[in-house]
Image (spheres, helix red, strand yellow):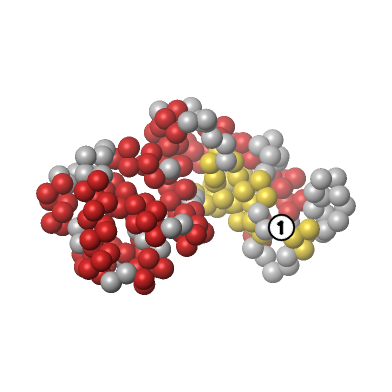
Amino acid sequence: MDKNTFLKIYFPNGSFHGLRYTSSTTVAELIRIVLKGRLSSYELFYHLSFALRVIYVGKEHQIANLRISSSSEKANLTDKWLHSNMTMEKVQRIYGPIEELKFDLRLRYFPQSIDALSYDKPTFGYFYEQLRIDYMRLKSEHVSVNEAIELGSLEIRKLFKDLNPTALDKKVNVDYLEKELGLKRFFPQSVIDSHKPKVLRKAIKACLKKYEGLAEEECVKRFC
């Protein structure tokens, strides 16, 4: 009988789902367990769009037996996608001990339109969070100032979806966002540093005015 072992699978926001596995457990089975435990009790329409990405976090960055494109050369493991049929025994044989690996659950495959994805609400929500977090961590410094302000304003509109335009206009200001939530939640540091609070407030309010009638789902679609 296989020995049960504990594994953490991480989400884009840094939280994780812990589960037990055996050497014969496949990547597809791990994904199914996590989706059922954290996203939905029923099978998601786009469940096959999810994949596991493994990142090496151990002290040694060289993986001796890793083969890429039939090459026998050693390679640095930064992040690799795991095939759904791969067993955990094979994962450890190729990539090393579990304690030296980090497993990320990612939405990897997408339908042709965002509208199609929106019919699967849990998957749509996961995609949005993944995209938003990736944007803030990796891409936000590479977009124009106007784009960054618009994207941040869409997130504010989504967050305060229950407020009517008048209440939103009174409640949302730079001082409040900075004190209660932190501007860095919505805008790149470069935008914050390059704008005086009064100028940034005016730009945010102009964008919020443009999006004042937008429903939460439409905010997400425009962001994506």
- Which quadrant is the N terminus positioned in? top right
Q: Position of residue 160 (x, y in %)?
A: 23, 49
In the image, residue 196 sits, relative to residue 10, either above or below, namely below
Report the side of 20 relative to 68 (left or right).
Answer: left
How many other residues sit within 10 Å of disc 1, few (<14), some (14-19) or many (≥20)? some
User: How many numbered callouts?
Assistant: 1
Depth order, front residue of 173/27: 173
Location of mark 1 (residue): 77
Depth order, front residue of 176/59: 176
- Which quadrant is the C terminus positioned in? top left
Tell me the quarter of the picture where residue 22 sits: top right
In the image, residue 13 sits, relative to residue 128, either above or below, namely below
Question: Would you say residue 124 is visible in this rendering?
Answer: yes
Q: Position of residue 107 (x, y in %)?
A: 53, 41
Most extreme residue toward the right, as rendered? Answer: 72
Judged from the image, the secondary structure of the residue bearing numbered disc 1 is: loop
Depth order, front residue of 194/218: 194
Instruction: Name which residue type carries label 1.
Output: Leu
Report the side of 156 relative to 106 (left or right).
Answer: left
Q: Residue at x 26, y 39 (%)?
A: 214
Q: Residue at x 47, y 48 (%)?
A: 130
